Image (spheres, rainbow, N blue to C red):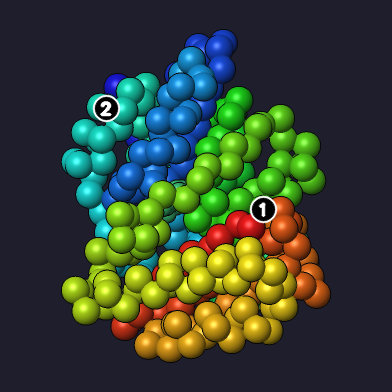
Amino acid sequence: MEIITTIQQLQEVRNTITTSVGFVPTMGALHDGHISLIKQAREQNEILIVSIFVNPTQFLKGEDLSTYPSKDEADKKICELAGVDYLFMPNINTMYSNDELGITAPIIRGFVLEGYNRPGHFDGVLQIVLKLFNLVRPTNAYFGKKDAQQLALIKQMVRNLYLQINIIECEIIRDTDGLALSSRNVYLNDEERKIALNISKSLREATKLILLGEYNIGKITKQMRSTLSQTDIEYIQIVSRNFTYIEECELQNTIILVATKVGTTRLIDNLWI
Ligand code: AMP
């Protein structure tokens, strides 16, 4: 595996590649969720490029940019063992100058849910992903359904800007106790972790209700609110897989999304029905 830190190096390497390129962008502190994306990309492409970059433009003031977990040495080992060919680890000054052209998330999908609670977050996500796409020029790029809205917006960016990249959707990886893996889980103490299990529990209960024929969104979210009562709920939303409003749950076309704080740690999770 070769570690690349400059744009020039990355462009030089990219210009020598004529086969398929799989790309997995991450913010590091890699866990089994990231590794599942990397493994899938390894199987489906000749060349595999992973990036690790904690992107400042997607963090709002007061969020955890300065304390975001970083495990560079462990991450390098994980990537090496997973068969990554090139690991791109730029620093902030490599990726950004002080006066940058921006990108604005679309209104319908970009300003609800995460976009409403974290205004500007998706502008920053799309900006960095587009920069990385232009550098890596991947054949296939891998994103987790854990960040369902991010995935939908990246697919829209690819459509709207005519990018010739296949976006591959990857399943959510959970711990054995059901908690969706996240780099932020390390912030949780033992007590908080127990409380956080109610997030996946609430989603499982919602699924059970739906499978029993309860499609009423109000009734389902009421049950979820009660299960999540020990947490500080930001939103529980049930939308179509296109992130549009639905009157009631529709099988094969529903996503249930939760964002909630456990202590000071903000966690998100979702389930696709
Ligand atoms: P991050 O490092 O949080 O920016 O995540 C990098 C990629 O890994 C994104 O596409 C995430 O959706 C994906 N990812 C993060 N956690 C999980 C998980 N538990 N299961 C599947 N994919 C995940």
User: Residue 231: in sight, yes or no?
Assistant: yes
Mark 2: few, some, or many residues within 10 Å (few <14, many ≥20)?
Answer: some
Few, some or many residues within 10 Å of mark 1 (<14, 14–19, 20+): some
In the picture, the quarter occupied by the N terminus is: top left
Residue at image position (44%, 38%) is 37
Residue 56, percent from left and from top: 44, 60
Q: CA distance from mark 1 to mark 2?
A: 30 Å
Q: Residue sitting at 54 percent across and 51 percent down?
A: 145
**Location of residue 262 with respect to 115 vertically, above or below:** below
The three-letter code of the residue at mark 1 reads Ala
Q: From this viewpoint, is residue 126 visible? A: no
Q: Is residue 231 above or below residue 178?
A: below
The residue that disc 1 covers is 152
Kindly identify which numbered label has been placed on residue 206.
none
- At 64% from the left and 58% from the top, the residue drawn is 273
Residue furthest to the front in view is 212
Residue 148, image x and y in percent? 58, 57
**What residue is shown at x 54% (from left), y 63% (from top)?**
270
Residue 35 horizontal side relative to residue 187, left or right: right
- x%, y% of residue 246? 79, 70
Numbered mark located on residue 80 in the image? 2
The amino acid at mark 2 is Glu
Q: Nearer the viewer, residue 51 or 220?
A: 220
Numbered disc 1: secondary structure:
helix
Q: Earlier in the sequence, mark 1 or mark 2?
A: 2
Q: Quadrant of residue 262?
A: bottom left
